Structures are given as C-alpha cells and as structure tokens.
Image (cartoon, rainbow, N blue to C red):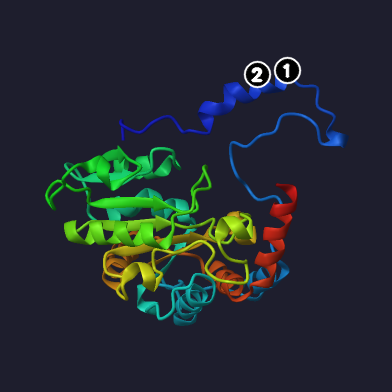
Amino acid sequence: MTSLPDFPWDSLAPAKERARAFSSPDEAKGEGIVDLSVGTPVDPTPEVVQQALRDAADAPGYPQTWGTPDLREGIADWFARRRGAPGLDPDGVLPTVGSKELVAWLPTLLGLGAGDVVAFPRVAYPTYDVGARIAGATPFAADATTAFGPTTPSSAPKLLWLNTPSNPTGKVLGVEHLAKVVAWARERGVVVASDECYAELDWRSEAERGQSLDELPTTPSILDPRVTGGSTEGLLAVYSTSKQSNLAGYRAAFVAGDPALVRQLLEVRKHAGMIVPWPVQRALLAAVRDDEHVAAQRERYRARR
C-alpha cells in the first residue's frame, strides 16, 4: 500500500483554493470557478428508478452476490438492445458496487500480483493504475499494443484496460481497432477489460459517427460480435449507470463478458462480501429496462455542452 499515490482529487485542493481567491462569485448568477475535477451528476435520479428502490425497501435477507437471474437477464438484454451485443450469456454478468470498486480490485480478483503487468491508456482514470498497485502488480501506461514491443505470452501484460469512450479525451475506438486488440490479446493470453461507462453519451455529429443516433451502437462495445468473433473468451466490459442514469449515489454498475472470468470474480466476491444491496439491484434493473430517461439525460448534457 506504500506505493499508492496521493488521492488524485485531494491533490487538486490547492488549485481550487487559488482559483476561488481570484474569482468573485455571484451565486445567484451561477458564477465562480468551473470545477471539473469530479464528474458527479447533479440532475434528479429518474422517478422510475426511485420507485423501484422504494418498492424494494423491505429487504431483511442477504442479497445474492451474483445478482438475481432477472437482473442478469435484464443486463444481457440491455447489451443486445443498446450495445449491439446480442446473445450474451447471463452467467457472464455480475452486478458491482459501482464501477470504481471493480476497476480498483479487478487485478486482485483475477489473482494478479508481483511480476504481472497491468496496462492502461496513458491519459486515463487514475484507478486503473491504483488497481495494479493494490494487487502488487506493475502498472504500465501505453496507448498502443506496439508499446509492448514483440511480446510473447510470457512478456505480455496479464490485464489490458481499454476506455472507450475515453475519460477524459472522449476518443471512441472503432470496431476494427477493437477487433485487432482482441486478436492481439488472445494470441498472448491477455485479459482485456473495456471501461465503457460513457457509451450512451455520444454527441458527435452524424458525419463524425458515420451514422445517426437511431443506429446502434454508436460507440462499439468490446462484446460486439464484430469484435469478438462470436466468443467472449478473455473479455470483460465494465459499465456504470452513474453517468447515464444519475445513479452515482446508488453505486449501481456491472461487469459482463467471459462467463469463466465472471465466475472467478464471483467466487472471490462471495467470500469477501462484495455484494450490491437488494434495493439497489432492483433499481439497477429498472434503469437498464428504461431507455427514455437515458435519452433525456443525453439531451440535457448535449444542450449544456
């Protein structure tokens, strides 16, 4: 743990104070510093989700770590409907306590440690790096597989993180790019985890996307069959409803993909008590079943942007 960096957002505190010293905010006019340090939602949680939470408030028993079958099936249906990834095995779906805990603990849950390399984009969410350090593995920042040189299975990273759409650059990796990464990884026994939590928030023009928003997916998933070749082996997609559904306070997210990998994560999580609360599981199911609130939120962000 001595290798962990200072908490990134804490390190920004002096910059915030300096900015405030140079501003004369008029709160009535919404003036003052523009704080982009933490992307926390400010709009209301959708009523359909709030009602699901209320309906599940009576929860005296322990919830299932794996999530209920209808939740896992609902998430699989969402992948087919919204992410262009039909036929996902519900056994390869697992709810998580927000996506950050999964990102931070994934190397540990996969059994990585000293001598193993965890790779991630050079400009990226700090938790990819932190997760490697928690496991005792070696963090490695790279923007292309060529950064690893002529790797063999013994010299390749054990885990490769992708982030598409990227936070903070917004870059979207296309189907061809993703398929090449998957092929490269499978030749070397590398697990690929794709953080896709901004997938529904696409404001590129139709010309930039090459398609309209009515054509899905506008931001391809690592689980898209054009990428996977029909097999999810070695692949995980990580998703959060915090951004699309204003559920940051609920800690409602999930990981999906290779059933063998998901079962490995599940076994450790059952022992460690890493369980999504029952009311939140019900709220998450309501969120992935309802597309209207997501479209409305995307339009709010588009207008503000």
Q: Which of the pair 66/40 is nearer the observer?
A: 40
Residue 44 at least partly seen: no
- Which residue does the image show at 48% across and 33% down from the upper left? 8
Figure check: 226 above or below 185? below
- Which residue does the image show at 54% across and 55% down from the upper left? 198
Q: Which residue is mark 1?
A: 22
Q: Which of the pair 265/224 is nearer the observer?
A: 224
- Under circle 1, the secondary element is loop
> Residue 213: where, in percent of width, then height?
62, 66
Label 2, residues with CA under 10 Å away: few <14, some 14-19, many ≥20: few
> Residue 126: where, in percent of width, then height?
43, 39
Mark 2 residue type = Arg
Q: Which mark is residue 18?
A: 2
Label 1, residues with CA under 10 Å away: few <14, some 14-19, many ≥20: few
Q: Is residue 248 left or right of residue 110?
A: right
Q: Which of the pair 136/259 is nearer the observer?
A: 259
Contact between marks 2 and 1 (CB within 8 A): the answer is: yes
- Which residue does the image show at 58% across and 26% down from the upper left? 13
The residues tagged by marks 2 and 1 sit, at their Cα atoms, a distance apart of 7 Å
Residue 194 at least partly seen: yes
Pick the quarter of the image with the N terminus.
Answer: top left
Figure check: 42 above or below 191? above
- Which residue does the image show at 42% across and 73% down from the upper left? 64
Q: Quadrant of residue 272?
A: bottom left
